[in-house]
Amino acid sequence: MRVIDVAIVGAGFAGLAMAGALRRAGRDDIVVLERADDVGGTWRENTYPGVACDVPAHLYSLAAHPNARWSRTFAPGGEIQAYLRDVAAREGLGDRLRLRTPLLGARWDADGSLWSLDTAADEPLLARSLVLACGRLTEPYVPAIPGLESFGGPIFHTARWDHGIDLTGKRVAVVGTGASAVQLVPELARRAGQVTLFQRTPAWIVPRGGDDIAEADRAHLAAHPGDLARLRADLYAEGEQRYASRSGDAAASAAARSAALDHLHAQVADPALRAALTPDYAFGCKRVLLSDTFYPAVASDAVTLEPTALAAVDGSTLTAASGRSHHADVLALATGFASTQQPYADLVRGETGTLAAHWSGGMTSFGSTVVAGFPNLFVLNGPNASLGHNSAVLMAEEQAAYVVRALCERDRRTEPVLRVRPEAEAAYTDEIAAAAASTPWLTGGCRNWYVDDRSGRLTLLWPGTVQAFRERLAATDGSEFEPVSDQAADSPASTAAPGETIPHTPA
């Protein structure tokens, strides 16, 4: 039975970044497993009206695959999906990419020092190392609302949008006012007969800006890659500057809060509606949203804001927590994703148990990438690898570079196994907790998906800048792994030496 060097699970941004980093390091013995019939991850799944990125597209792309041809500052979802298809083709993955191949289980085989992967194929796939690039926004969250099953019309989550439903003239209810709803509601206001928006908690919303990118400008960037690189660098710097306002810096937070309130006052004239749309928690405590069209849509006659949660459903009658009743023909759930438990955690069994058991008190790791008790396993977009201020693609790229360096360390060893020292994981967890202790994510007076309810720890966000993350991973020297007494003297199996930082230009 053939043994693959590295198996990657997931063909979204993180999985493709990982595959590219490995191939550029001379590691071609890889396979990418994707459960769907196409690449793209969240941009394949989310096709609701108005879906787009809220990070400038020239930064929300891979450093190895800059794209001069984005049509808008904030690219539509379909365009990002097309970009990821192009990346997969340019990486020449060929038969290394296995579509319609879900991971059904992964088990560490201590005798062979291999990962045994069940993919419903005739025999298990064996891999020396396993990279989970499954993403965290994969399983739609459907709230337990009494009577939800009694709703007689179409009902679907924004991540499972039913484009076969004609919304013209229909009464559409939207549950939630997060990032998806802010993009969706203005589109529905133009299409549907009436929109009712159930808001449990208002969001801080700042101006989005951006526009169509003229063909002449696209052609210029394509012909002048240096200008494209400088644009990316400028966008990166702007993103890093936003960290201060999101993380609780007093002056920066006050300025950003003032800008958000000015934006609200400029677009919503009704004082009562403005009050209902004004958050009562610290700026940055929840995800800050970008929109120039949400407030005007909510303020229009096309939308009715119900400023409390949906509490019960009885056929077409929707009852809010306020006691008010509303009627709808179509119900759209903009309720986000299951975040406390990563969907793959139950499937992966290490030396003593599953990832789900290891993370029963909230996700932990070293370097946001490797986990004690799970040899030769790497997790991208997992513990403390998300951002609230800059492009998350940058984090995945840094993690991919770290994985390549770690594999060099693995290959130096007479026993090619990397076991994370539990003390290293505990120290990193404490490091995260100390950095997060005074931030709005923990102290801002809101409930957010960044914090694990079971432990009260910040488990999704990295409490720092991208540069700080880059420096933290670059400073690792292999001491996070259990030592091996008789190391091979040399001959790493990659173009990067152990501990060497692979050159990477973030912007």
Image (cartoon, rainbow, N blue to C red):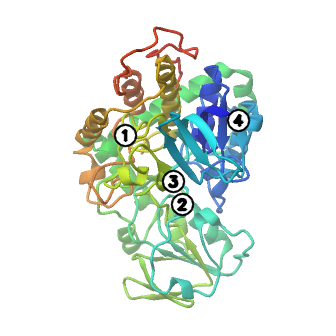
On the image, numbered disc 3 is attached to which residue?
A: 347
Q: Earlier in the sequence, mark 1 or mark 3?
A: 3
Quick check: 463 left or right of 324? left
Can you give x and y, in whole percent of width and height, for residue 171 in the image?
62, 82
CA gap, disc 1 and disc 3: 17 Å
Which one is in front, 84 or 296? Answer: 84
For discs 2 and 4, the disc positioned in front in the rendered view: 2
Image disc number at residue 365: 1
Can you give x and y, in whole percent of width and height, for residue 490 in the image?
49, 9
- Indicate the quadrant containing the N terminus: top left, top right, bottom left or bottom right: top right
- What's the residue type where badge 3 is placed? Leu
Q: Earlier in the sequence, mark 3 or mark 2?
A: 2
With respect to residue 289, does 32 lie above or below? above
Residue 331 visible to the viewer? yes
CA gap, disc 4 and disc 1: 29 Å
Residue 287 visible to the viewer? no
For discs 3 and 4, the disc positioned in front in the rendered view: 3
What kind of element bears circle 2?
loop
What kind of element bears circle 3?
helix
Can you give x and y, in whole percent of width and height, for residue 257 in the image?
34, 51
With respect to residue 173, does 471 lie above or below? above
- What's the residue type where badge 1 is placed? Ser
CA gap, disc 2 and disc 1: 22 Å
Q: Earlier in the sequence, mark 4 or mark 1?
A: 4
On the image, which quarter does residue 421 sit in?
top left
On the image, numbered disc 2 is attached to which residue?
A: 139
Q: Earlier in the sequence, mark 3 or mark 4?
A: 4
